[in-house]
Amino acid sequence: MSGRTIGKGTWLDKVAHHIVERERRLGRGSSMLRVESGLGASGIPHIGSLSDAVRAYGVKLALEDSGYGSELIAFSDDMDGLRKIPSGLPKDLEGYIGMPVSRIPDPFGCHGSYGEHMSGLLLDALDDLGVEYRHHTGVEAYRGGLLVQQVRKILGNAEVVGRKIEEMTGQGKFVKVLPFFPVCERCGRIYTTVATGYDPRTGTVTYKCSGGEIGGRWVPGCGHEGEVKITDGEGKLSWKAEFAARWAALDIRFEAYGKDLADSVRVNDWISDRVLGYPHPYHIRYELFLDKSGRKISKSIGSTLTPQAWMRYGTKQSLVLLMFKRIVGSRSVSVEEIPKYVDEYDRLEDLYFGRKEVKSREKLMKLRGLYEYVNFLRPPGRPDVHVPFRLLAELAYVAPEDDVVGFVIGRLRRYNMVKGPTAGLVEKIRKARSWALDVMGRETLFVPSRHEAEAMLELSGVMRSTEDPEMIQGAVFDIARRHGIDPPEFFKALYMVLIGTDKGPRFSSYVLDIGREKAAETIEMASRRALDGGGPTS
């Protein structure tokens, strides 16, 4: 295997290869290699939630590209109980803590339930991206009998399962109670119940609603004692066992997981292998997306970055690129970084169509493969017009409200950067306008060297003092030489500060178009950051 490029050379191809090789060793049929992604239904979907499904879809595409049948199963866990009220949602949801999200009214009034609303946001994002999937819900799975056979086996072996959970995770809870949560027929809560017995002849679970720790606090039960049949859909397996049941029932061959679920996955692997007799799926572990402060992006606190927010400002391809670029290493993501991914996709497209060169043949193959996967193996027939996103944002910001697209296209024509509008360019201009109005100014600026910063502060004085484009343009050359800087390098630094790329339109024309004061203020801000110790020293 060493030295041979697999498929298109991406991590998706490597994962697909490992799945196929493992199935061969297991001796299982490989005509259909299903992959799964769980969709949370208890909170507002964020970029991390979406990435699970999109990356699984990428593996599905890689399997198909290798000649195997595959499909993505998107499973909404809408039998899950509400643990916390996500930031920004009505406080009156407090009365529904512990109830299955499928049985909580939609606070927005547009779906049949809270769970349907939250799952719907994620499914809408998948649809917008063009991801193909087969959808299952927890409610349908338990009520429709999909998991009955697996539930019987797990509850029939509850004692050994409980001991193994304790051995592998240190959680001793399921040594005493069954790994199953009935829905209390009196109060409607699911995580306040304790399953105390199981009759395999009738498939009946007895329980008591005695209370439980939910979302980090104790929620008292109503005291009701009752029973449910596992065929009624009035209960669900614990996460420590439910994944295994789904894998076996749906014949899943691949599922990734985040490190926060590592213990649950290990237990489920054992249950799948030893209790259900179904070899567990091939796994990869991915790192989590973090917010700007370095915290895990959460659906229950205010650090949520939703797919809808990303697509308000960035292209679909930029969002998929974020997911497919790599699988290892945690990354901080924010709306401030969207221009970086939009521009990176454009550079990939330039490489794919030969507009730019990469010396390494292996690297070129990998980047071309990444481009094809970002386009879900249906790349366009020709490249689009590419303009740095930050340049579009700056121009769109100063454009008249009633003719944003016309104004920006006119300026780009004057800069000899485009001949006319394309559908893709118009879409970017509109998104750039939204980004400029909502976000621009909050993003992290490029920090020049100290020499460059000192020269930029001198230049900003000239920019504020004259409207003569030739004086401004000439000043760049004169000031650069006085400070011992090569003028082309000084221009690159100025463009990086102003538009985030190392080249752009004629400097003086652009400065006058966006406003001398605004351009000078931006340059001064970056320069002061460098001189205060925030940038390179030379």
Image (tube, grey):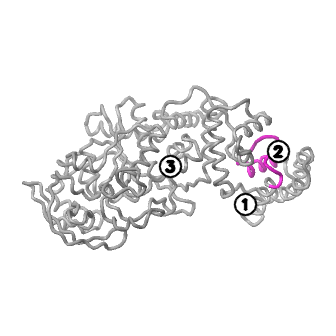
Q: Is residue 12 above or below residue 439?
A: above
* Disc 3 from disc 1: Cα separation: 32 Å
Is the residue marked by circle 1 packed among few (<14), some (14-19), or many (20+) residues within 10 Å?
Answer: some
* Residue highlighted by disc 2: 507
* Residue highlighted by disc 3: 307
- At 50% from the left and 58% from the top, the residue drawn is 304
**Left or right of 138 in this view: 414:** right
* Disc 3 from disc 2: Cα separation: 35 Å
* Residue highlighted by disc 1: 535
The secondary element bearing badge 1 is classed as: loop
Amino acid at pointer 2: Phe
- Splitting the image into 4 quarters, where does residue 217 fall? bottom left
Discs 3/1, front:
3
Amino acid at pointer 1: Gly
Q: Is residue 398 above or below residue 217?
A: above
Amino acid at pointer 3: Pro
Is residue 493 covered in magenta?
Answer: yes
Where, quadrant-wise, is the C terminus in this rendering?
A: bottom right
